[in-house]
Amino acid sequence: MIGAGVPESANDWPDGILSALRRFRQGDLVADPPMAYLADPRAPVWEQSVRFAKELIASGDPVMPEVIHFPEGLTPPYGMITTQTCDLVEEDATPPGWPWAQVIPVYNMDEPLNSGEKKLLREGRFRRSWLHVPAVTPGFYVADFRISFPVEKGWLVRQARVDGFESEELRQRVGDRLALLSGRPAFAGSFITTIQDPLTQALRELKRVDRVEFNRMDEMVPEIGVLMDSRLSPSNVQIVVVSTAPLDGAQMEWWSRWWDRCRQQAAATGITLQALDFKVLDENYSAVEYRRLTHLPLPNVSPD
């Protein structure tokens, strides 16, 4: 086990490492981090893997899985720490048990992104695998959650800490995004194709044809929940629209039209779509009811 090689007490760690870790937080950046991944040249996916596979085959060397380090030009200027602060610092741990921290790449996307995409990223409404890092300027820096690289804490403490978020409120976006990516519920394909995907498409269409109405809906409906008898084999489903205030007639009509279209599609796959339920986030909506919901992963409706 890995645990067999971890220092048995705080005194067994290299001098100064644990105290130096206290200045770091989840969401902090370090400059010029290493990045690498394991690839199989027999089935390369990423462009760099394809290039490596071609070079390996041309060389006549054995074609075997290899660890590929990011080439010059793709090495990110920064890496963002995604390890939770408590696991990073381990201030009260007896003994400390996390020798490593996880780092993800951060790139300057000022030129590749247009102004509309930047606006959506600032609002957290573009690709869920990307997160805007607002405090690093000039430029427009974005963290990419699709790859993570472990670094030992002894390396980390010798790096300069770069604050990417400037406030705890902004820094919380890192933890929230990690929770979204790792905590998304698994749904049956029948639910996704007849209910979840049509809802996403309907919201995108509303955004395309009536941006003002979409923005109003987006502001008033922060969450969409679902009650179902089974996530993986559902037969009875109810969508719960959670709003900050009562919806008006036009908004209610929009939801009713969407429900009517989906009801028949869902029935064809054996799902009974119950009548919509509308809940307002106020003192009358109990915590017990709210906790019963499974929240649909619809943090944005822009192309991902």
Image: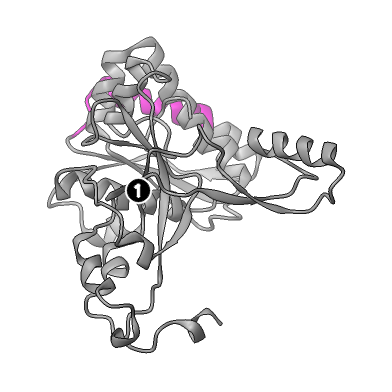
Residue at (38%, 51%) from the top-left corner? 178
For numbered disc 1, what is the local secondary structure? strand
Magenta-colored stretch includes residue 80: no
Q: Is residue 240 above or below residue 211?
A: below
Tell me what residue is drawn at x 49 percent, y 83 percent. 5
Location of residue 267 in the rendering, given as x and y in whole percent from the top left corner:
60, 39
Viewed as shown, does residue 27 lie left or right of 56?
A: left
Query: In the rendered image, which residue does mark 1 sit on?
Result: 80
Q: Position of residue 134 (x, y in %)?
A: 23, 34
Quadrant position of residue 88: bottom left
Q: Main secondary structure of the magenta part?
A: helix
- Residue 204 drawn above or below residue 100: above
Q: Disc 1 residue type?
A: Met
**Picture coordinates of residue 36 (x, y %)?**
55, 50
Based on the picture, tell me whether residue 251 belongs to the magenta stretch: yes
Residue range of the region highlighted in magenta in the rendering = 246-262
Q: Position of residue 281 (x, y in %)?
A: 19, 45
Q: Alpha-carbon neighbours of circle 1 within 10 Å: few (<14), some, or many (≥20)?
A: many
Q: Work out which residue is located at the far top of the displayed protein and give it.
A: 209
Q: How is the image coloured?
A: one colour
Q: Give left or right: position of 169 versus 303.
A: left
Pick the residue in front: 1 or 10: 10
